[in-house]
Amino acid sequence: MTWQTFLLIVGYIFVSLTLFMTLAWLAWLRTRNSGWVDTAWSLSCGITGVAGALWFADLSPRAVLVAAFAALWSLRLGVHLGQRTRGKADDPRYAALISDWGQDAPRQMFWFLQYQAWAGLPLVLSIVLAALNPQALWRWVDVLAVAVMAVALIGEAVADDQLRRYRGRGERNGVCDIGLWRYSRHPNYFFEFLSWCAYPLLAVSLNEPWGWLALAGPATIYWLLVHISGIPPLEEHMLRTRGDAFRDYQRRTNAFFPGPRK
């Protein structure tokens, strides 16, 4: 791959994600429901990744596999987030930000969503780079990538379903510590991170140094989930609404990586 091709790919991803999240901002202006923001983000990354993988890699077998990964991830997460948002007025994380912004909320929200779009750039880039690996498909690391993605998608779906069932019992003010939630406070986030680890496995090749840049995908999602938009605001909300019950859960349970209870 040449520098010109690389810059073309980056430009395509940047413009696509920027436009998608601008549409999400316009939808928020109309509805004032921030709950759909995460749904829009997951679908925008999925659509951009699928189209980029198939277009730039000329429908190669590897590109089809990578596009299938991205489509499955995006559809599962998008549908889950959409179902969770339906009937709700707002997302508590975004609601807190909007309240702090006051009258400046429309402008602040626009840039906040653009930052999300730009944060998605290394993620979608890892998808396209995985599709562009010139090696023949089904090396042992490709088989490992399929296994990693399967575990990630199933694990995240199970974690989401366990939380939904817990809340369905009417325990909305308690702390879910059943199933996978006994071993991690955020197992859905962990499996989300794991899903992005599949793309570097598909992308890395001794014959294509560009593929190593796909490692930016899992590094970025880890940074976002653990330090920026995932765990910090969510746990702040949980401490505010669950109090000592959640503090006790924090003391007993790992934050991100699953492990034995303390």
Image (spheres, grey):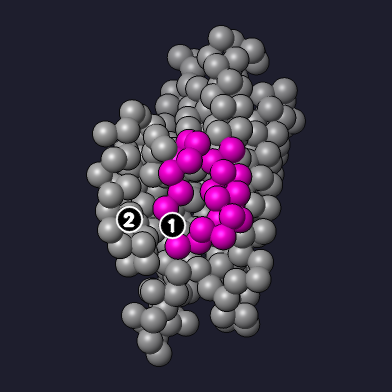
Q: Which amino acid does label 1 sit on?
A: Gly
Q: Residue at x 32, y 55 (%)?
A: 245
Residue nearest the observer in this picture, 217 or 4: 217
| Screen quadrant of the C terminus | top left
Check whether the beta carbons of the residues at disc 1 and disc 2 lie within 8 A of each other.
yes
Can you tell which mark lies on residue 174?
1
- Going 43% across and 82% down the picture, which residue do you hit? 105
Helix, strand, or loop for circle 2? helix
Q: Which residue lies furthest to the bottom in this view?
A: 103
Vertical position of residue 145 compared to residue 86: above or below: above
Residue 130 left/right relative to 3: right
162 inside magenta stretch: yes
Residue in view at x 72 percent, y 23 percent = 61
Mark 2 surroundings within 10 Å by alpha-carbon count, few (fewer than 14), some (14 through 19), many (20 or more): some
Q: Is residue 222 visible?
A: no
Q: Distance between the residues labelled 1 and 2?
A: 7 Å
Q: Is residue 23 left or right of residue 223?
A: right
Residue at 36% x, 52% y is 231
Task: Identify residue for label 2.
Answer: 245
Of residues 247 and 78, the one drawn nearer to the viewer in this rendering: 247
Question: Vertical placement of 198 versus 174: above or below?
Answer: above
Q: Can residue 177 be seen in the rendering of this structure?
A: yes
Residue 11 placement (x, y as % from top left):
53, 51
Which portion, as a residue range, is magenta? 158-181
Q: Is residue 65 magenta?
A: no
Residue 109 coordinates in the image, percent (x, y): 45, 74
Q: Residues within 10 Å of mark 1 (few under 14, many from 20)?
A: some
Horizontal relation, residue 199 to residue 99: left or right: right
Mark with earlier residue (1, 2): 1
